Image (spheres, rainbow, N blue to C red):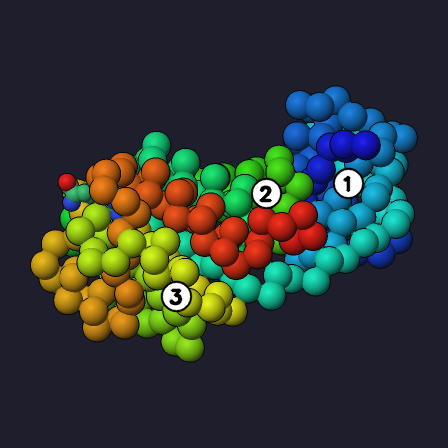
Amino acid sequence: MSRHRFFVAPDQPLAGETVLDGEEAHHLSTVLRLGPGAAIELLDGQGSVYQGEVLAASRRQVRVRLLEQRWQPPPARRLILAPALLKKKGFDLVLQKATELGVHALLPVLSHRCVAQAKDEVARWPRLVREAAKQCGARYLPELLPPRPLADLAVGRGLGLALHESAGEDLAAFLARSAPPADLLCLVGPEGGWDPEDMGDIRAAGLVPVRLGPRILRAETAALAAAAILQLWLGNLDSGAV
Ligand code: SAH
């Protein structure tokens, strides 16, 4: 049975009874008009899903009795999608759809040709990610990392790919000759592509340039196509995955 889902705030108790407030309370009581007795699902974004029953609901606060809990361990392999900042519409799409695809983290990257987003738009990102996760019943909420300049991108112990429309190797060929790692970062360029300095930063970060076929894709298409392909490769689109 599909039930309405809500996220519990990290500071709320997760045994016996809990409280929803802010947007979640508003959504439950005002938008969906649910009240005492309603059966809901609560997610903690950390692998747990609780069956819950609404005890009392007002516009500002909802009290919920927590019933059965199920926990799923985190995925063994993690994709960090690192898209360069895009204009609002394209970037919102990337955040929402990458969340639906179950990426582990989203790392906005500042490259030379990307347009900076206004502060209030950046402040909307956590809500966009939460809503997308809620809508698709994600057990894990992607981590939204603070924007980082391309020059400071270090891959650490994992593997890093950089999408480039004129890279010497196709992504398919690269995947065919590689074993899926535990940590994978995928960098995607902005609307205007990479400039020569960015290419220097990409090399310095040890990222492998790969190409997604002969067509020049819009940045958001490239990001989401790569996210889907890589999630499949990592096993995160299997039915047993979280
Ligand atoms: N510099 C180009 C294209 C930019 S496309 C121009 O302005 O004409 C935006 C981003 O999408 C690129 O930086 C790259 O990361 C990704 N991208 C688009 N098409 C791609 C392809 N065929 N293969 C790999 N990456 C691609």
- Circle nearer the N terminus (1, 3): 1
Amino acid tagged 1? Glu
Residue 158, percent across and down?
Answer: 42, 72
Q: Residue furthest left?
A: 196
Mark 1: is the Cβ under 8 angstroms from ligand 1? no
Tags 3 and 2 touching, CB below 8 Å? no
Q: CA distance from mark 2 to mark 1?
A: 13 Å
Q: Please determine whether, in this image, residue 73 is positioned above or below residue 55.
A: below
Circle 3 Cα neighbour tier, 10 Å, few/some/many (<14 / 14–19 / ≥20):
few
Q: Which residue is mark 3?
A: 177
Residue 133 disc label: 2
Amino acid tagged 2? Ala
Residue 238, percent across and down?
Answer: 62, 50
Q: Which residue is mark 1?
A: 41
For the point 44% across and 59% down, the residue is 80
Name the side, left or right, on which 194 lies relative to 220: left
What is the secondary structure assignment of the residue under circle 3?
A: loop
* Of 161 and 178, the residue lying toward us: 178
Amino acid tagged 3? Arg
Q: Please determine whether, in this image, residue 178 is positioned above or below residue 114.
A: below
* Of 128 and 234, the residue lying toward us: 234
* Of 131 and 169, the residue lying toward us: 169
- Circle nearer the N terminus (3, 2): 2
Camera-near label (1 vs 3) is 3
Examine the rendering and report whether any part of residue 166 can be seen: yes
Residue 210, percent across and down?
Answer: 28, 57
